[in-house]
């Protein structure tokens, strides 16, 4: 080491880091100069920045759902990773400690170009080395005679593979009951598999042999009916299937085929036995979660358990009958725990100007939203209903942009620090009532706004908030998620239709709507 580096306290401190201990003198000089000047030092061909920062406890390095382009080496302190989930829950994923094992983070976001899976926040005062994307790329890929540091590339590649695999598994709904240690055990023994375009991943009628999580590519789900095969769904990156392997209904209900080259992680049924071993509680939680997912896939949960499939129905408002009382939107708010309405009264007006087709999901035969989602946040039941996995939704807006009918929209919802009760409606969803509809109000009064107004207190309407105001509500953090009509799943009726005092809103088939339009002409 040259004398100027050997006597430099910053260089000596950086050399103590496992990632940087073998950094070449040329790169160490550049790094030290970049940190001290805060600008691009010579030579100009490098063009990357680095800095050492001291931050206070509570500082957020990376926010869940945001894109990050920086790499961090934790020199001192503790950083905690947490993931916000539905109903204000926060899942602790682990901690990173300075000079203790893998004391760096940010490589997954840079190498995958995906939004952050979790929020990374300082537990106590921390000192970090921050390197931009260009610097990370040079340090990890320069392996020539004047290599930056071969160890840097190998260590970050290893941490990327492990951490990205754990994130992928953590996002699978069936694995939600597992703690971080059990997720790590699964990730270490998961079987990576690759399928060529057109190759069958799983065959209908054959016993399901495990849970599959898609790493890359698209898997086509094909159902056979009346001797004919038809496209049913498309499963993109981060999607999972095969939960029935953990239940009594252990046969594939459909055929799964690779639409493109597909990379998956397979978790064999036997692996789960090995992971939870004699832990009866974990085994039961896994089986219960898998059963709920299979029931939802089979259409045995929610409104679909009581009604025929409405995959082609249209929600129509009669403009002659509608008095604009907003009872339909208030009812929609009342039956959703996050207090965000799924109903939007905006939509396409019929040619005779008598009706409006509201923005309710059409459950397309070939759903563009499902193909566009890269985070496994959209699933489809066997009877055709499209559902969202809100814990997996990053708010990237791709489904909203790809929906040809403008049904999907983004809404700000309560995040990590908030409770289950949000305070504002969806963008374009209309106002909502602020009556006695809190936790003490009965489910019946909550689902019947008209009766609530009579027996449950005043139905005072709150002013609408802007999206920016929603993000800065005092004491709460908020994040965006995709929403759409869910047929009031879990209720014996559709709240908007049932609560309309004028019978102005109803569901009809497209054929019936065309017949009515033809009769009116």
Image (tube, rainbow, N blue to C red):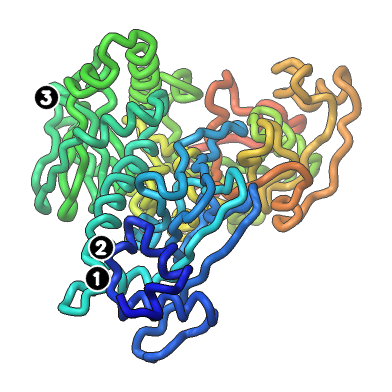
To which quarter of the image does residue 324 belong? top right
Q: Earlier in the sequence, mark 3 or mark 1?
A: 1
Local packing at callout 3 (Cα closer than 10 Å; few below 14, some 14-19, many 20+) is few
To which quarter of the image does residue 38 belong? bottom right
Residue to which mark 1 is pinned? 141
Q: Is 195 placed above or below 502 here?
A: below
Name the residue located 36 percent from the left edge and 43 percent from the top edge.
Answer: 167
Name the residue located 40 percent from the left edge and 80 percent from the top edge.
Answer: 4
Residue to which mark 2 is pinned? 153
- 337 sits to left or right of 288: right
- Tell me the distance, in whole angstroms, between the alpha carbons under discs 3 and 2: 43 Å
Q: Earlier in the sequence, mark 1 or mark 2?
A: 1
To which quarter of the image does residue 136 belong? bottom left
Q: Are marks 3 and 2 in contact (CB under 8 Å)?
A: no
Q: State the mark number for residue 206.
A: 3
Name the residue located 24 percent from the left edge and 61 percent from the top edge.
Answer: 151
């Amino acid at each position: 080491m040259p004398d100027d580096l050997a006597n430099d306290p910053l260089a000596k401190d950086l050399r103590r880091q496992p990632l940087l201990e073998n950094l070449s003198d040329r790169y160490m000089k550049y790094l030290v100069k970049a940190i001290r000047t805060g600008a691009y030092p010579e030579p100009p061909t490098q063009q990357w920045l680095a800095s050492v920062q001291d931050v206070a406890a509570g500082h957020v390095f990376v926010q869940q759902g945001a894109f990050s382009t920086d790499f961090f080496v934790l020199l001192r302190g503790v950083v905690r990773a947490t993931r916000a989930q539905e109903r204000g829950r926060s899942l602790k994923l682990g901690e990173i400690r300075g000079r203790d094992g893998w004391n760096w983070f940010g490589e997954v976001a840079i190498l995958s170009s995906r939004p952050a899976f979790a929020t990374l926040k300082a537990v106590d005062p921390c000192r970090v080395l921050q390197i931009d994307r260009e610097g990370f790329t040079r340090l990890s890929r320069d392996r020539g005679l004047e290599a930056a540091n071969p160890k840097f590339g190998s260590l970050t590649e290893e941490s990327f593979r492990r951490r990205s695999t754990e994130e992928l598994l953590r996002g699978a709904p069936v694995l939600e009951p597992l703690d971080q240690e059990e997720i790590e055990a699964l990730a270490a023994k998961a079987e990576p598999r690759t399928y060529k375009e057109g190759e069958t991943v799983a065959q209908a009628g054959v016993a399901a042999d495990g849970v599959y999580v898609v790493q890359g590519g698209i898997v086509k789900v094909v159902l056979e009916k009346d001797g004919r095969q038809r496209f049913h769904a498309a499963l993109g990156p981060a999607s999972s299937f095969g939960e029935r392997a953990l239940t009594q209904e252990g046969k594939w209900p459909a055929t799964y085929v690779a639409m493109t080259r597909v990379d998956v992680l397979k978790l064999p049924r036997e692996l789960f036995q090995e992971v939870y071993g004699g832990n009866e509680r974990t085994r039961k939680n896994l089986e219960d979660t898998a059963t709920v997912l299979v029931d939802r896939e089979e259409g045995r949960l929610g409104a679909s358990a009581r009604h025929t499939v409405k995959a082609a129905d249209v929600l129509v408002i009669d403009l002659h009958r509608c008095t604009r009382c907003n009872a339909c939107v208030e009812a929609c708010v009342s039956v959703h725990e996050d207090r965000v309405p799924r109903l939007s009264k905006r939509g396409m007006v019929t040619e005779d100007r008598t009706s409006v087709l509201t923005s309710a999901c059409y459950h397309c035969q070939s759903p563009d939203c499902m193909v566009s989602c890269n985070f496994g946040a959209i699933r489809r039941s066997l009877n055709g209903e499209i559902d969202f996995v809100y814990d997996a939704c990053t708010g990237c807006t791709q489904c909203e942009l790809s929906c040809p009918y403008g049904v999907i929209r983004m809404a700000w919802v309560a995040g990590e620090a908030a409770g289950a009760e949000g305070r504002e409606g969806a963008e374009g969803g209309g106002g909502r009532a602020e009556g006695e509809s809190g936790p003490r109000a009965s489910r019946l009064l909550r689902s019947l706004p008209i009766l609530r107004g009579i027996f449950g207190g005043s139905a005072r309407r709150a002013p609408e908030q802007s999206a920016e105001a929603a993000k800065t509500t005092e004491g709460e953090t908020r994040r965006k998620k995709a929403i759409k009509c869910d047929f009031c799943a879990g209720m014996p009726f559709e709240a908007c239709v049932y609560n309309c005092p004028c019978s102005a809103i109803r569901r009809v088939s497209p054929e019936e709507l065309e017949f009515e339009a033809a009769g009116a002409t």
